[in-house]
Image (cartoon, rainbow, N blue to C red):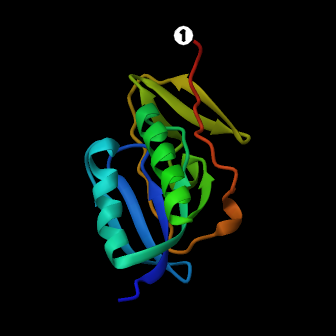
Amino acid sequence: MQRQKCDIILVSVSSPILLGIYINNKLLKKFETSGKTSDVLFDVFFDIMSEYSISRIFYANGPGNFSSIKLTHIFLQTLKIIEDVELFCVDSFYFTKDNFIEAYGRIHFFKENNDIKTIKLEVKKSAVFELPDIIDSAKFSNSCFPLYVLPAV
């Protein structure tokens, strides 16, 4: 049985993890999974890959949860090698209308003039991430590396 080709958008920088299946650049199915990236990423992809053949993966490469960013990078680079999947990435702010993304404690990431920095807020804020209805591939880069934005310790 021939599996249908699809593209994926993945936002795994925080919980819940969002994954969309796209056919002809249009959102077909959406998955939202709570839990740690290390606990759910493989299972979600295993289920999808039993039904679909993934051509391209578009994903948020950071900022966000440091461990999730590292794990996602390694997982997707492995898929790129063994499944010949093309990877494209963009910063996490593309997937939210919020101004701040939680880093740790009351420290948050914010983007100003295409520069991502950290700031301490009085009240902790959690960004709400959303999948786009249509893939705009012009917003993504094929030079995909984890985007770590960490202040000096």
Outermost residue to the top: 153
What residue is shown with label 1? 153
Label total for image: 1
* Residue 117 located left or right of residue 55: right
Q: Quadrant of residue 71?
A: top left
* Label 1 Cα neighbours within 10 Å, binned few <14 / some 14-19 / many ≥20: few
- Up-down: is 13 above or below 20? above
- The spot of residue 110 in percent (x, y) is 58, 35
- Seen from the viewer's position, the closer of residues 62 and 110 is 62
- Seen from the viewer's position, the closer of residues 118 and 89 is 89
- The spot of residue 59 in percent (x, y) is 53, 55
Residue 19 appearing in the image: yes
Residue at horizontal 55%, vertical 74%? 134
* Residue 7 located left or right of residue 113: left
- Up-down: is 3 above or below 104? below
Residue 97 appearing in the image: no
